[in-house]
Image (cartoon, rainbow, N blue to C red):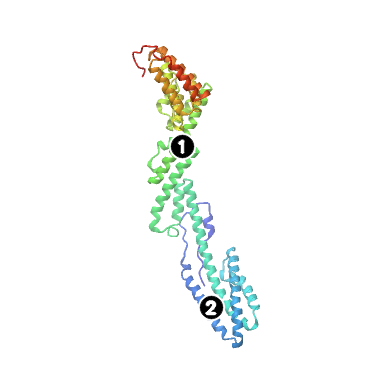
C-alpha cells in the first residue's frame, strides 16, 4: 500500500508566520508512473487470459462488447477521481473501493452473460490502475497548491514591505520549494524587493514624511541592488513632484487669502527637500517691498516660464517663499495663474519684444526710474492684451509702442 504524503494543506493557509521549515516528503510519488505503466500493460494480458474463457463462437461478439465496455470503465474512473478530489480522504484505498465498486459492478452486470467474467477481470484491473493514477494526481495537485499558498505568503510579505516576515516565509520553503543552492540568492532578492516596496508604500501614504525619512536613511533600510534602488529613486522623484505640487498649492491658497504661510508647514517642506533652508527663512519674513526693477524681473520670469509643470511649480515656490510683502507675492501668483492660460511661445515673444523696446530707449533712458516704471506698467498691460485679445492684437499693440523709438538719448543699457 502506498504511503500518503505527509502534508496538511491547512498549514499553508495559516495567517501567522511558520516557526520552522515545513518539509514535504515526496518519495511516495517515486515509482508511481512505473506502477501505472505496469498495470496498463497488464490490461492486455487480462483480455488475452479472459478470452480463453470464451468459446470460439462468442469471442468476436465479446471482444466488441468489451471494447465498448472499456469506455464505460474510463468514465467511472474519471467520475470517482473527480468526486474524491473534492473530499478529505484519510484512507484512499477504502474510499476508492466504497465509491467505485458499486459502479463497476453495475457496469459488469450490464454485459451479456458470456462477457461478464472477462468484464469483471477487466474492471478489477482498470480500477487498480485508475486508483493509482488518481491518487498520484491528487498528491501532485496538493503539492502545487501548497507551493502556491507558500508563494502567496512570500509575495504578500514582500508587497507589504515586511522584510523579516518575507525572509521567514522564504526559509520555511527551503529544500521543499527552494533548493539549498539557491536559498541565499533568493533571500537577497526577496530582501531587496521588500525594502523597495516599503519605500514605495511610504511615498504613496505620506510623501512629506517619507521624503524626510529617506534623506536620513541608513544603508540597511535601502536596497543594495541596482534595479530595486532605481525603483526607489523613481518613486522618490514622483513623490517629490507630488509633494511639491501640493505645497505650491498650499502657498498659493495662503497668500491669495492674505496669510503668511505657516512656519510648521514650511518646515515640513524644508525637511522633505521641497524648498531650501534659505527659502524657508525668507518665507517667514518681509524685508521690504519690491523695487520697480525687481518687479519687472519677476514678471519677466513669469512671462517666460515654460508650460511644463515642474518649471511652473518651481516658480510658484520661489514667489511663495520670497522675502517680500504678502500682497506683492499674491499679485505675482495671480499673474502666474493668468499666464498659465496663454501659450508660452506667445508670452516669451511679448516679453522679449518689450525688453527689446526698453533697451532701445523707447520708454526712456534704460535704468532711469521713469523708464523702468513704464516698462513695469507695459508688462502688466501686455499680458492682459495677449490673454484677452490674442497674439495678433498684442502684435499690433507692440507695433504702436515702437513708433515712439528715437525720442530718447540713451547712455547705458539696463541689464
Q: Nearer the viewer, residue 176 or 200?
A: 200
User: What residue do we see at 57% from left, 64% from top?
Assistant: 85
Residue plotted at (59% across, 88% down): 56
Query: Residue 288: x and y, percent?
Result: 43, 16
Residue 288 visible? The answer is no
Q: Quadrant of residue 398?
A: top left
Q: Earlier in the sequence, mark 1 or mark 2?
A: 2
Image: 184 above or below 259:
below
Q: Secondary structure at mark 2?
A: helix
Residue 11: image location, x then y, percent: 52, 57
Depicted 34 relative to depicted 268: above or below: below
Nearer to me, 261 or 167: 261
Point out residue 358 in the picture as x, y percentages from the top left corner.
Answer: 40, 17
Badge number at residue 49: none
Give residue 109's quadrant in the image: bottom right
> For the residue labelled by badge 1, is the local secondary structure a helix, a strand or a loop?
helix
Tag 2 residue? 43
Q: CA distance from mark 1 to mark 2?
A: 69 Å
User: Label 2: few (<14), some or many (≥20) within 10 Å?
Assistant: some
Q: Residue furthest left?
A: 411
Label 1: which residue?
239
State which quadrant residue 414 falls in.
top left
> Where residue 331 sits in the image (x, y, percent)?
49, 21
Amino acid at each position: 500500500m502506498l504511503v500518503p504524503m505527509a502534508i496538511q494543506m491547512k498549514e499553508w493557509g495559516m495567517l501567522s508566520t511558520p516557526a520552522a521549515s515545513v518539509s514535504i516528503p515526496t518519495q511516495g510519488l517515486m515509482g508511481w508512473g512505473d506502477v501505472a505503466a505496469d498495470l496498463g500493460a497488464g490490461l492486455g494480458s487480462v483480455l488475452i487470459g479472459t478470452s480463453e474463457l470464451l468459446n470460439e463462437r462468442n469471442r468476436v461478439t465479446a471482444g466488441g462488447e468489451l471494447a465498448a465496455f472499456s469506455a464505460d470503465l474510463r468514465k467511472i474512473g474519471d467520475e470517482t477521481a473527480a468526486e474524491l478530489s473534492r473530499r478529505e480522504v484519510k484512507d484512499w484505498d477504502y474510499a476508492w473501493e466504497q465509491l467505485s465498486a458499486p459502479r463497476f459492478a453495475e457496469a459488469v452486470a450490464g454485459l451479456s452473460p458470456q462477457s461478464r467474467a472477462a468484464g469483471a477481470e477487466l474492471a478489477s484491473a482498470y480500477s487498480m490502475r485508475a486508483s493509482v493514477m488518481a491518487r498520484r494526481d491528487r498528491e501532485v495537485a496538493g503539492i502545487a497548491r501548497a507551493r502556491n499558498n507558500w508563494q502567496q505568503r512570500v509575495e504578500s510579505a514582500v508587497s507589504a514591505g515586511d522584510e523579516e516576515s518575507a525572509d521567514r516565509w522564504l526559509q520555511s520553503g527551503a529544500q521543499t520549494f527552494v533548493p539549498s543552492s539557491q536559498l541565499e540568492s533568493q533571500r537577497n532578492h526577496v530582501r531587496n524587493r521588500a525594502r523597495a516596496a516599503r519605500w514605495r508604500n511610504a511615498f504613496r501614504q505620506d510623501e512629506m514624511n517619507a521624503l524626510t525619512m529617506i534623506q536620513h536613511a541608513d544603508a540597511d533600510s535601502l536596497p543594495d541592488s541596482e534595479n530595486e534602488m532605481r525603483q526607489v529613486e523613481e518613486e522618490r522623484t514622483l513623490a517629490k513632484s507630488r509633494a511639491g505640487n501640493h505645497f505650491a498649492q498650499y502657498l498659493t491658497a495662503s497668500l491669495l487669502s492674505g496669510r503668511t504661510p505657516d512656519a510648521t508647514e514650511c518646515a515640513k517642506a524644508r525637511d522633505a527637500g521641497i524648498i531650501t533652508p534659505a527659502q524657508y527663512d525668507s518665507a517667514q519674513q518681509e524685508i521690504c517691498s519690491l523695487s520697480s526693477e525687481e518687479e519687472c524681473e519677476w514678471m519677466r520670469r513669469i512671462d517666460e516660464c515654460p508650460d511644463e509643470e515642474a518649471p511652473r511649480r518651481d516658480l510658484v515656490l520661489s514667489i511663495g517663499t520670497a522675502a517680500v510683502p504678502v500682497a506683492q507675492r499674491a499679485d505675482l501668483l495671480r499673474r502666474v495663474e493668468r499666464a498659465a492660460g496663454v501659450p508660452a511661445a506667445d508670452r516669451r515673444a511679448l516679453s522679449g519684444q518689450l525688453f527689446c523696446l526698453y533697451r532701445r530707449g523707447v520708454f526712456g533712458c534704460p535704468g532711469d526710474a521713469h523708464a523702468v516704471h513704464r516698462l513695469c506698467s507695459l508688462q502688466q498691460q501686455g499680458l492682459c492684451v495677449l490673454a484677452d485679445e490674442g497674439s495678433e492684437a498684442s502684435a499690433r499693440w507692440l507695433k504702436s509702442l515702437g513708433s515712439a523709438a528715437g525720442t530718447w538719448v540713451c547712455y547705458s543699457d539696463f541689464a
